[in-house]
Image (cartoon, rainbow, N blue to C red):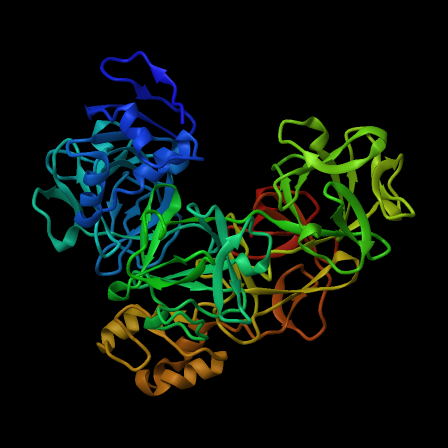
């Protein structure tokens, strides 16, 4: 493996600017030591990521790295902005670190994650076991402290730099680089004055990303895919093209639960469980770039085993074997012609529509940029559809080729695709897909379907779409989310349905009530902040704990649980939506970015959010209020 050598002072230093670079440190690793480490088949960016993330906060791994690289070797890795993560930071009492709108002050006043509680953690550099970070608030200001220990938000400077120290329980500790003091909670809020560690300085990171994720395993270069019928999963998928690659990641009481596409949970017992419990709770150790490990305590950690990649709990993973990268999955779709045949790759690169059943070769990653009508279709092999000579469409395109771009036009649940030669894609009588139609008619329309989304969770500019706590009316400013079941129907349309009477999370934040009653050891896992319930309908939830909290609180509990009753979305004459319909309505979906879509209601208008929380369909214009993250 040949590294470029720069004429810097001292020994040769490998330089790479893609994701990270090594700069001068106390001791510089030589080219010979780098070659001694097994880096065959890896480029330098992958190598620096691997080396950086092999420095967890425990002495066992530290000793391993000392043996590997030699004593005294110290690396400084300067991370790029792409390594930043968005999180909420929670104290031991369940309060979130909050950036206030006025006065640029910070506080601990809420137990819910909202925009003011989200911090972008920018990883500046790594030196040994210490990581230098900045905490950026919603308003672009950075968390910082002064000599007196006052904590506030201000434009980034040297006082906003902290050393991030990872703890064995998954929590984070922040130490001011300038003053050597620790960020901690106190009676009045937040301060940064103590130079000795204590329990008040631990902050639990709460992921602030959309909960629908995929797990990428960098060592095997594959995605985790569940075999739900068999009750297990494997790190085997070359791309997250299937709904079986999708997980919902739930956060509760400092622990994370991974829910599969069939609404069961990974567990420490190496089986899928239908209910969330202590057996499905993992401690997540989160690092830069959303790299994470999932710990089951004394039982071990979650990682793919042996050559099969079987996902299970184990005690002795090899280097990087237990590391996953949490990613948002781009949409994968299928295309069907007017004759109900799927567009499929045949004979290696040729594109045909001959079969009524789809395979993996019928799946395409739908790549489109916001405010653009140009789309690229990527196969599971990583190649792009491209327009070639004589109007042929082949699956052999590279990212740099202009002929891989197609102009997309949405027609309800169908699309048309115009190639670089200005001709529309159509199907020959033998089934071959070519770009030869001068005008777009019914034969040039393709029915588009989402292939890797068994359901939707929609987050808009003001929050999630979920039912109102007092009625069946849908709101667009909720902090909790609910599943929207998708039923495919003719013409590329979808029917939207509630989650059949079951709460998605099964967790109700009733901290004030439970704390006042001092309930801490109930059968269903009351822990002072949240309550675990058995899976069931809304009324079954109430029945499970009504004898604990008393009849006087049942009405409040009904309001907290909401009214997601499994019925269909219905639209009132004023354009307001609720989940109360017996007859389904036809909705169409339009994809406008990797994880952004618009939804057109039966009245021809787009679903729009409002700062008052009202979900409506009254506009024919696409703007920030009509875009939904999915």
* Percent x, y of residue 39: 38, 35
Please name whichever residue, 271 or 499, is drawn nearer the observer in this view of the structure: 271
Q: Is residue 21 above or below residue 106?
A: above
* Percent x, y of residue 586: 73, 62
Q: Is residue 406 above or below residue 443?
A: above
Count of labels shown? 0
* Percent x, y of residue 78: 31, 29
Left or right: residue 127 compared with residue 557: left
Left or right: residue 240 compared with residue 326: right
Can I make out residue 129 in this image?
no
Please name whichever residue, 497 or 248, is drawn nearer the observer in this view of the structure: 248
Residue at the spot 69% in from the left edge and 27% down from the top edge: 402
Left or right: residue 496 compared with residue 418: left
User: Quadrant location of the N terminus?
Assistant: top left
* Percent x, y of residue 7: 31, 11
Q: Where, by quadrant of the figure, is residue 437 drawn? A: top right
Can I make out residue 468 in this image?
yes
Left or right: residue 310 compared with residue 124: right
Please name whichever residue, 90 or 79, is drawn nearer the observer in this view of the structure: 79
Please name whichever residue, 20 or 408, is drawn nearer the observer in this view of the structure: 20
Residue at the spot 70% in from the left edge and 33% down from the top edge: 405
Q: Residue furthest right?
A: 429
Q: Where, by quadrant of the figure, is residue 349 drawn? A: top right
Q: Is residue 590 above or below residue 230?
A: above
Residue at the spot 63% in from the left edge and 61% down from the top edge: 576
Q: Where, by quadrant of the figure, is residue 273 drawn? A: bottom left
């Amino acid at each position: 493996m040949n590294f470029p050598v720069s004429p810097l002072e001292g020994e040769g230093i490998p330089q790479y600017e893609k994701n990270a670079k090594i700069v001068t440190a106390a001791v510089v690793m030589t080219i010979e030591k780098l070659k001694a480490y097994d880096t065959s088949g890896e480029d330098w960016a992958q190598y620096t990521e691997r080396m950086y993330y092999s420095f967890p906060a425990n002495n066992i791994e530290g000793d391993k790295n000392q043996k590997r690289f030699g004593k005294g070797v110290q690396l400084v890795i300067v991370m790029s902005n792409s390594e930043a993560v968005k999180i909420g930071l929670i104290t031991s009492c369940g309060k979130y670190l909050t950036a206030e709108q006025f006065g640029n002050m910070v506080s601990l006043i809420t137990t819910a994650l909202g925009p003011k509680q989200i911090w972008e953690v920018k990883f500046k550099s790594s030196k040994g076991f210490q990581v230098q970070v900045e905490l950026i608030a919603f308003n672009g200001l950075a968390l910082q402290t002064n000599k007196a220990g006052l904590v506030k938000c201000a434009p980034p400077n040297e006082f906003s730099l902290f050393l991030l120290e990872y703890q064995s329980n998954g929590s984070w500790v922040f130490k001011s680089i300038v003053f050597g003091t620790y960020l901690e909670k106190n009676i009045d809020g937040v301060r940064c004055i103590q130079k000795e560690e204590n329990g008040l300085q631990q902050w639990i990171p709460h992921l602030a990303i959309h909960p629908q994720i995929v797990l990428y395993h960098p060592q095997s270069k594959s995605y985790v895919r569940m075999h739900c019928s068999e009750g297990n999963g494997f790190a085997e998928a070359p791309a997250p093209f299937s709904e079986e690659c999708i997980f919902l990641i739930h956060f509760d009481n400092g622990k994370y639960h991974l829910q599969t596409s069939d609404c069961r949970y990974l567990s420490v017992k190496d089986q899928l469980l239908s209910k969330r419990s202590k057996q499905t709770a993992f401690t997540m150790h989160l690092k830069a770039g959303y790299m994470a490990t999932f710990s089951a305590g004394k039982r071990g950690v979650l990682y793919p085993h042996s050559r099969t990649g079987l996902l299970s709990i184990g005690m002795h993973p090899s280097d990087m074997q237990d590391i996953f990268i949490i990613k948002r999955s781009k949409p994968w779709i299928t295309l069907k012609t007017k004759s109900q045949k799927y567009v499929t790759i045949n004979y290696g690169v040729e594109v045909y529509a001959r079969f009524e059943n789809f395979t993996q070769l019928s799946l395409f990653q739908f790549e489109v940029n916001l405010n653009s009508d140009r789309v690229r279709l990527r196969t599971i092999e990583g190649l792009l559809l491209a327009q070639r000579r004589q109007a042929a469409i082949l699956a052999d395109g590279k990212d740099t080729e202009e002929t891989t771009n197609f102009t997309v036009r949405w027609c309800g649940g169908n699309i048309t695709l115009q190639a670089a030669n200005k001709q529309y894609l159509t199907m020959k009588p033998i089934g071959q897909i070519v770009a030869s139609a001068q005008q777009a008619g019914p034969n040039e329309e393709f029915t588009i379907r989402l292939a890797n989304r068994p359901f939707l969770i929609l987050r808009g500019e003001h929050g999630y779409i979920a039912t109102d706590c007092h009625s069946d009316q849908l709101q667009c400013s909720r902090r909790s989310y609910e599943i929207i079941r998708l039923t495919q129907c003719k013409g590329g349309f979808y029917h939207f349905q509630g989650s059949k009477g079951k709460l998605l999370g099964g967790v109700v934040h009733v901290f004030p009530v439970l704390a006042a009653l001092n309930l801490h050891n109930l059968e269903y896992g009351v822990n002072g902040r949240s309550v675990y319930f058995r899976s069931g309908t809304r009324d079954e939830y109430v029945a499970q704990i009504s004898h604990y909290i008393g009849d006087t609180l049942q009405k409040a509990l009904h309001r907290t649980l909401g009214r997601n009753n499994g019925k269909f979305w219905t639209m009132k004459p004023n354009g307001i939506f609720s989940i109360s319909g017996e007859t389904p309505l036809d909705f169409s979906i339009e994809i406008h970015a990797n994880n952004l879509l618009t939804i057109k209601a039966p009245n021809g208008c787009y679903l729009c959010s409002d700062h008052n929380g009202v979900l409506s369909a009254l506009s024919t214009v696409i703007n920030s209020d009509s875009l939904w993250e999915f």
